[in-house]
Amino acid sequence: MATALITGAAAGLGAEFARQLAQRGADLVLVGRTRETLDTLAAHLREAYEVRVEVLTADLSVERQLARVVRRVQDRQHPIDVLVNNAGFGLPLAFADNDIDDEVRHLRVHVEAPMRLMHAALGAMRGRGGRIINVASVAGFISRSTYSACKGWLIGFSRWANAEYARDRVTVTAVCPGFTHTTFHERMGLPPGKEGIPDIMWLNAADVVREGLRDAARGKAVSIPSLRYKAIVALSRVLPSGLTASVARRGRI
């Protein structure tokens, strides 16, 4: 039976990945910062789907706590078959207005943590096979501050790694949703639907995860849920970067 490790599993897309993978019979390792929330989710998943659920509390911006998660991914006695790099957060201000220590912590969670976890997972999965899912964003195709840059790195690295490690039966997929109804915006003090974004642009978390898992199973390097965001990404490749950056300032993806 497969085992999936999910970071940022306490809420939002992470919790939805946990639910859908449990529905498919996968055992789980839930990683997050809040033990109580993780324990509540774990108890629900055990009861609802009769799967094994392990809880691992860690702040991925703290080196020694990230190291604990890396060691769990490297554990060949209890192997991880699916790694979902989902942990992340947004910053409320423009780069020059944010505290630089917050920006560095942001970079650690969005780039360093998934890079270290992917390195650990590849070491354990090569030859045996496995899947790595990196939750990126449509923002990765658009010029906008460090969040966009971090997600752009994740997309580019996933494309390369998916091709490079296909010979080892490991797939790497960057899932790139647009505006999605989760608690992400609320944690930034920006409630969903309050940013001047039309209702039609908002996605449902269950749909994002369902399509992301489907594309990962097909071995796709990049998954962009919904036709409307596929069209936006296609347009972003031909429009001037200044224009796309101006549009992107209207909200947080």
Image: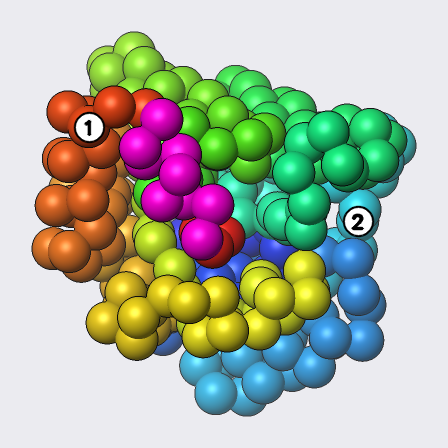
- At x 45%, y 53%, the residue is 250
Mark 1 crowdedness (10 Å alpha carbons): few <14, some 14-19, many ≥20: few
| Amino acid bearing label 2 | Ala
Q: Is residue 248 magenta?
A: yes
Please name the residue that numbered disc 2 is placed on.
58
Residue 35: percent from the left, percent from the top? 81, 68
Q: Residue 195: x percent and y percent?
A: 48, 66
Left or right of 66? Residue 42 is left
Q: Is residue 13 above or below residue 42?
A: above
Q: What element carries label 1?
A: loop
Q: Please tell me the numbered disc located at residue 27.
A: none
Magenta stretch secondary structure, dominant: helix
- The quarter of the rendered structure image containing the N terminus is bottom left
At x 58% / y 85%, what residue is drawn?
44
- Residue 160, compared with residue 88, is above or below; it is above
- Please provide percent x and percent y for residue 209: 33, 61
Asked whether the viewer can see residue 74, the reply is: no
Q: Does label 2 or label 1 sit earlier along the sequence? A: 2
Is 64 on the left-hand or right-hand side of 181? right
Residue 207 percent across, percent down from the top left: 27, 68
Determine the secondary structure under disc 2. Answer: loop
User: Label 1, on which residue?
Assistant: 239
Q: Quarter-wise, where is residue 47 in the image?
A: bottom right
Amino acid on which disc 1 is placed: Leu
Q: How has the structure been colored for display? A: rainbow
Q: What stretch is highlighted in magenta?
A: 242-250
